Image: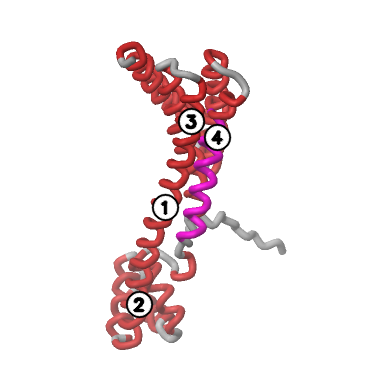
Amino acid sequence: METHQSSHRDISGGGARAAVFGVSDGLLSNVALILGVAGARPAPSAVVIAGLAGLVAGAFSMGVGEYISMGAQRELFQHELRIEEREIRDRPEAETRELQELYVSRGVPPALASEVSKYLMKNPDTALKVHAQEELGVAPDSIGSPIQAALASFFSFALGAAIPLIAWFITIGSAAVIASAISAGVATLLVGGGLAAMTGRSITKGALRQLVLSMIATSVTYGVGHILGGTIR
């Protein structure tokens, strides 16, 4: 007899989430910055400098921000886990009743809830995992790594930010603006479609939504740059 095993991606670590949003943010923010500066029609070197500055500053900002955020979240979870561990050790009867009441509130018959709760509380490690999952919504062994999330965010942002900048190392002027916009548009479609595929949504809708939002942002910044370029000299 064949057994069916359901497999799911591990999405709790933080690295995958940081990478996806890092690419998306890097792509959108830097193409908007590049086209905004280009709209003012400065020297091509000014656009390249602005794009490189946006890439470096954004990558460090994303990486540091992700590290601090994930670090604070991890410390908070660990603090709560230590409290829960102490409660299980010092007040096992109260924690057993708490678990039982939780199961009863979810529709489990009282007798069965009592039996299951007492069984789970026999092993302190198992009890901690169950209480953490039920009360904190997190498994103790699946707390994300701040370093992993920071590195993923840093490099993915840099990758996304580099895409619209490449054209400016190859050509200049209107050709660079068009090439930058097209390369960013294609990358945006891929990122939007990939994100939609990961979450089980329509790939076409996800890609087009990402593209439309990016077009709005870049159009506005290009227009602002064009206006300012004509008034501030």
Which dot marks residue 64? 1
Rendering coords of residue 55 (x, y %)? 48, 38
Residue at image location 29% in from the left, 86% down from the top: 91
Q: Looking at the picture, does residue 166 appear above or below residue 130?
A: above
**Quadrant of the frame with the N terminus:** bottom right
Residue type pointed to by label 1: Val
Residue type pointed to by label 3: Ile
Q: What stretch is highlighted in magenta?
A: 146-164
Question: Which of disc 3 and disc 4 is earlier in sequence?
Answer: 3
The reply to whether dot 2 and dot 3 touch (C-beta < 8 Å) is no
Rendering coords of residue 126 (x, y %)? 45, 78
Between disc 4 and disc 3, the foreground one is 3
Residue type pointed to by label 2: Arg
Predominant SS of the magenta segment: helix
Q: Which residue lies furthest to the bottom in this view?
A: 90
Residue at image location 56% in from the left, 54% down from the top: 9
Question: Which of disc 3 and disc 2 is earlier in sequence?
Answer: 3
Question: Which of disc 3 and disc 1 is earlier in sequence?
Answer: 3
Gap in angstroms between the C-alphas marked 1 and 4: 19 Å
Q: How crowded is mark 2: few (under 14 residues within 10 Å), some or many (20 or more)?
A: few
Q: Which residue lies furthest to the right in this view?
A: 1
Check residue 4 for magenta coloring: no
Gap in angstroms between the C-alphas marked 4 and 3: 12 Å
Is residue 189 visible in this depiction of the protein? no
Is residue 108 visible in this depiction of the protein? yes
Please give the residue where the numbered disc 2 appears in the rendered image.
82
Q: Is mark 4 on a helix, strand or loop?
A: helix
Q: Looking at the picture, does residue 107 appear above or below residue 214?
A: below
**Quadrant of the frame with the C terminus:** top left
Which dot marks residue 49? 3
